[in-house]
Amino acid sequence: MASTQSADIEMASPRLTRTPLIAPSLLSCDFGHIAREVRAIEEEGADWLHVDVMDGHFVPNMTFGPPLVKAMGAVATRPLDVHLMVTNPIEYAPNYVAAGADILTYHWETVGGGSAAGARVTNRAFRDAGVGKVGVSINPNTPVEPLGEILDEVDLVLVMSVFPGFGGQRFMEEVLGKVTWLREQGYQGHIEMDGGINGETIGRCAAAGTDVFVAGSAIFGASDRRATMAEFRQRAAAASRPLEGGVS
């Protein structure tokens, strides 16, 4: 299993700022040479490795079963950030934890039709499965406010800025308000943004309060992936929203 690495926290007295984390999406890597791609993208500066799991039901595509994630984990030294875009996340969780997931995120929409009670059951099941960090994700058309009841139970909130399972979508600017709301509630866990992240959008995400940035083609399609990730990190750091008080 890849070793979980917590984000560095830097003092910006009297406030704290979390170091931006870049999480390249392996959905955009060369599938024919996954081990080589994992080693290369880590060496080029990835903080986390984002793994999109799709079941062909919650979203129309199918990707990355546990054996393939296990193969990634066998060579990865950065945390495997596994995003379960599946209808029954509790059923999938033990296999992905066994395969090497360090961070495991489910979709709010899949738990009791989107309910705090369903989320609490899922959070407990994920913890019982032994995962290091538990995350919850919401689609662009899902309101963020109901998550207020379970924010103290999750380590990460993943805000989708496109609809999962469909490529070629524009970044949905309106989701930034969800990030701002989370920080205004005092949430100091990770907030991850997935979809349409590039050199133009990453600063706006960071300014709202995002600290983990998922990018696929913008990184894997770049002529210089190292330079691209360094630029993303610099732009995010320059725009990062300070966190009031301590951090969890």
Image (tube, helix red, strand yellow):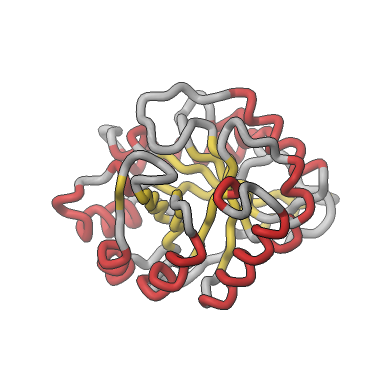
Q: Residue at x 30, y 50 (%)?
A: 63
Q: Is residue 197 visible?
A: no
Q: Residue at x 20, y 46 (%)?
A: 30
Compare residues 82 and 146 and report the one nearer the observer: 146
Tell me which corner region of the image, top left, top right, bottom left or bottom right, holds residue 159: top right
Q: Is residue 172 left or right of residue 169?
A: right
Compare residues 201 and 98 and report the one nearer the observer: 98
Q: Quadrant of the C terminus?
A: bottom right
Q: Residue at x 69, y 36 (%)?
A: 143
- Is residue 171 placed above or below 74 in the rendered structure? above
Q: Residue at x 33, y 34 (%)?
A: 217
Q: Is residue 7 left or right of residue 48?
A: right
- Is residue 245 placed above or below 203 in the rendered structure? below
Q: Quadrant of the N terminus?
A: bottom left
Q: Position of residue 24 (x, y in %)?
A: 39, 46
Tell me which corner region of the image, top left, top right, bottom left or bottom right, holds residue 139: top right
Q: Position of residue 41 (x, y in %)?
A: 31, 51
